[in-house]
Amino acid sequence: MTLTPLQEARARWLAEQGCKYPRTTVQEAVRVGLPLSYALAFLQKESSGRDEHGRAAFGLNLFGHDAVPNPIKGGTVNRTRYQQYVSARRAGHGMQGVGPCQLTWWQFQDHADQLGGCWKPAYNMRVGFGIAKALIQKHGKQRGAARYNGTGDAAEAYGRDWLAKQRHWHDLLEDVGGGGGPAAPPRPKPARPKAKPAPAPAPAGQRRAFVLTSPYMKGKDIKRFQEALNARLRARKLGLRVEADGEYGPETNAAYREVAYALGLNDETIAKGPTIGAQRIVEDPETRTPEQLKLAKKRAKEGGSVDKVLRWCESKVGTVERPANSNRGAEIDKWQSEFGIGGTYWCGAFVGYAVRRVGGVPISNSVVYTPSILAAAHARTGGYEGFYAWKDRKPGDLVLFRFPGGSRDPVHHVGIYLGDGYTIEGNTSSGSAGDQSNGGGVFKRKRDPSVIVGCARPRYCR
């Protein structure tokens, strides 16, 4: 692809700013139609680090460090290592971010392979920039960027930080859109964008509210709060636990929501996060108001999160695709959108939505790729307590299936265990006829144990 003189000038300037593949970045942004400032902000968020010469750079061709059993993680992406990674991925060892755009979902990686190789920066960027453009067109700049990262509070923090970086690049480039179109030459030797520092710890003896930020808030006060959360979790025999590491991340936030719900804080208060007042209640539940005590008692009678999840799943039995055989539908689209997908296999999106949105478990986005459920459960990461044999099943477990004649993946399908041998499954058929792993609706099923791989158990509040 031939660049204009201005685009060539930009590529040369970007090389001075630490962009690892400046000409490729400009080419692929132009090809896809993503403004250059947007592309640079994504590369800075996804693949910053040190190059082979020890210099600060971004847009690096690296593997991610997600906590999955796949042995290929970190370090440079090349054809040999990528092929080793794909072999491990297909064996059920989980997905990992790949390349400058950190493509993690297997279909995105396969798409880049079809273009010429996910391990090649140009094709990696072409797919990543295309995904980013579609998300921003649908959701707007900040929310679209957040969706590129995922969903939840951490993704929202990603979106805010991305927007700040995009605006900075826009100012430097005087970008008017179109992937760095006809803008004036860049200003000489501008300062390189710097990562936003984490909020400073509170002074000794002074309280502060905790919120999800990027980077995470840190401090001894957060560690004390985590210890208080664990005390409440143990006292109420809730399954979730957090590491008292002094960082306010997604797992601590999820634990707070569970504890606050059990203690009787109202939904509005819970949504604000651990305010100073909410922290005091977690530390000393005796300070609750009569209204909070009454609500806590009512919620205890309603049952734990497993019961809520199963009631919700039962209410969805009979939901079918509209139109038929489309992998779409009003509710089905909502479940898929939660995990940044659409119009594709949705059995994982169904159970994932139930566990995350109804059960309050911070389940990983990889729930939509069934082999990754197996890998994460074995590794006890991504919101899973562990992996269990069918004979040790409990209501609320995610039941993993592998059908004869299917793909070589270790898992083909997932449902949620209801009890008495029954599961509720999305994206399946109502009986033995029809496609079992890409059917048209949500149905209650009782399957032969020979097709059951085992059970992945989410970290429910029980």
Image (cartoon, rainbow, N blue to C red):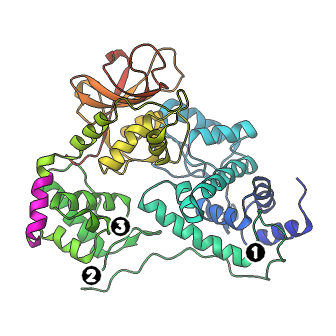
Report helix, strand or loop for mark 3.
strand
Kindly report the distance in space between the C-alpha atoms of the residues bearing marks 3 and 2: 14 Å
Residue 411 is at least partly visible in this image? no
- Residue shown at 16% from the left, 70% from the top: 281
* Most foreground residue, 130 or 380: 130
Viewer-proximal residue, 252 or 323?
Answer: 323
Sequence-earlier tag: 3 or 2:
2
Instruction: Give left or right: position of 91 versus 452.
Output: right
Instruction: Name the quadrant containing residue 309.
Output: top left
Name the main secondary structure of what is drawn in magenta: helix
Q: Residue at x 37, y 59 (%)?
A: 250
Which residue lies under the disc numbered 3? 248
Indicate which disc, 1 or 2, sits on the residue closer to the N terminus: 1
Give the mark toward the camera: 1 or 3. 1
Amino acid marked by disc 2: Arg
Alpha-carbon distance for marks 1 and 3? 35 Å
Closer-to-camera residue (62/142): 142
Between 293 and 112, the one nearer to me in the picture: 293
Q: Which residues are magenta?
A: 287-299
Disc 1 crowd rating (10 Å Cα; few below 14, some 14-19, many 20+) is: many
Q: Amino acid under label 3?
A: Tyr
What's the mark number on residue 173?
1
Decide: is 22 above or below 363: below
195 is higher (above) or lower (below) than 151: below
